[in-house]
Amino acid sequence: MRFSELARVFRKMEDTSSRLALTDELAKVFKESEPGEMRKLVYLCQGIVKPAHEGIELGMAGKLAMRSISISSGKKQEDIEKIYRKEGDLGLAAEIAMGKRTQGVLVRQEPSVEKVYGNFYKIATAGGSGSQDLKVKLLSELLGSCEAEEARILVRFVTGSLRMGVGDATIIDALSYWAAGDKRFHDDIARAYNMRGDLGLVAELLFSKGIEAVKRISPEPFDPIRPALAERLPSAKEIFERLGKCAVEGKYDGFRIQVHVKGGRIEIYSRRQEKITHMFPDIVAAVKKQVKAKEIIFEGEAIAYSDETGTFQPFQVTIQRKRKHEVEEKAAELPLKLFAFELLFIDGKDYTQKPYRERVEKLRQTIAAGDTIDLAHRITASTPEEINAFFDESVSSGLEGIIAKDLEAPYVAGARKFAWIKLKKSYKGELTDTLDVAIVGYYRGKGNRTEFGLGGILTAAYDDSKNVFKTIAKIGTGFSEEQMAQFKKTLDEIKSKDRPAQVDSVLEPDVWVKPKYVVTVNADEITRSPTHTCGIGKIKGHENEGLALRFPRLVGDIRTDKSAEDATTEKEVLEMFSMQKQKATEPSGQA
Ligand code: ATP
């Protein structure tokens, strides 16, 4: 396929947020692809060159991209910068500059998708001395052989600011339409993707071997599995009504990791499937000592723990261990404990389909006693009172709350299901849970805040059924001065001239940004709102109103462990809103 065809579709897709229209466009692209191209096409649609766990990211710096635009348009770099400053968008600047190129191109070799992908891959993997020049050359080679509108897409892609609102779910729909003519294969494709974290691989298999082969996909060490997530309910009573006799575990507020072992190799992956092994030499050493299996995939929560005081550290402290430099020093200063809670694969056997009680029993047999890895503390509860007692015990030992687990459920990769139900401690007058919201814009700030260029952010919940971000809160409290400057710098790299197609908002921030970063926010309660779009049309009797957070406060920094699509969903916000109403009418609070 020629790149120009793909770029045309990408351009169209930047202007629409209708999931149906996006699916339709993508299915057409897949229909026209050639064997061997499928995998690359899917990665390009995802805006990546390789799945996250391979650690190959594009993210070319804007300055370098400007050099490429300058070379291929024949215009001075200062002129490109001027256009960029005026337009506020490097993709558009490229399109304008290339539209008026001073060096004519007589014979143009239109690049194929294959060629473009190849250059992107080389840009992403170039390293060492001379790599900057190489990147500039690889991009300008592409720009030089493209039309101006294609330049816009190329530059947005390499700098990570492509605005297509296409999420994984839409790509999966499109693959199903392409292969079956309808959504019939969606669930099988999604399951396979959740198992292997590589949609390109699944698409290629679908293309070459058909849906039966996709159905047979099972876990494989070093392909991280997308994590199962927890639902929430407001009380032990409701949890018990839902699950009956169940397992209850402490909810550790650290970070989730997935450990993979095979053939003597050990890797650790984050919740977002990034490879983070080098950050945790202490855990790698403990796996060697304490895990009695040749091949295994298991999960747990890593949390900084002080042996001296016997207490867990808060999330903000634990997260300092997620770093690239001074790893050993920090490991000595903040030793981690890993509380293992899931077994997904062991010695050639897929455990994801087995009931929870079997997975956890096998996990117990596999982990030997030691200082670093332990099993998550757990009871089996036969009454709501037992759940409550364990909840109180967990909270008083410094944990966030509990997670109740269905003893019979399989591991539901990549989905939020009632197989796990969380219950967190509640602070008087506050929501029982924090929310994770995506940043969609920022305000320049008033008074002394103008000095940082950022005084607050506009944030949104994620409507995963439509792949749209809907606003829920303007946050101006909880930022340190350092953070304001840091947020501005980070957000400026992804600013957008207009409201991104994926954002549904009535409010207009001073600067729009592409939904990419997530922050955690605490608030007093969720209230109905005339100005926010989250929940509009979904609140019985108040269809014209949305939902907002009352007195929202930022907690911590940008969450590097979550992507925008991992933000709290609109559906969850609606659930939290109705739980809150229920709670208000209940006499006895939490339980
Ligand atoms: P939160 O922001 O509340 O931690 P989340 O969006 O990260 O939520 P949830 O699905 O709400 O994820 O809660 C599950 C998370 O809780 C897991 O991703 C994991 O990191 C953490 N966790 C801590 N202890 C456990 C446990 N015993 N079993 C499962 N998950 C646990």
Image (spheres, rainbow, N blue to C red):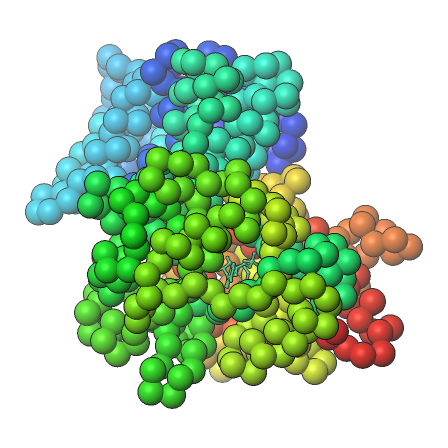
Q: Residue furthest right?
A: 541
Q: Is residue 94 visible from the viewing direction of this image? A: no
Residue found at x 62% / y 79%? 392
| Near-viewer residue (582 or 6) | 582
Residue 433, percent across and down? 63, 68
Residue 537, percent across and down? 81, 48
- Give above or below for 342 relative to 576: above
Q: Residue furthest bottom?
A: 309
Residue 406, percent across and down? 63, 52
**Side of 211 where 66 appears, left or right:** left
Q: Is residue 478 visible from the viewing direction of this image? A: yes
| Near-viewer residue (28 or 504) | 28
**Side of 290 where 359 appears, left or right:** right
Q: Report the number of discs.
A: 0
Quadrant containing the N terminus is: top left
| Near-viewer residue (123 or 197) | 197
**Res. 589 image quadrant:** bottom right
Residue 51, percent across and down? 36, 38
Q: Residue furthest left?
A: 129
| Near-viewer residue (131 or 15) | 131
Residue found at x 34% / y 16%? 36
Residue found at x 51% / y 48%? 358
Quadrant containing the C terminus is: bottom right
**Res. 59 image quadrant:** top left
Residue found at x 53% / y 33%? 191
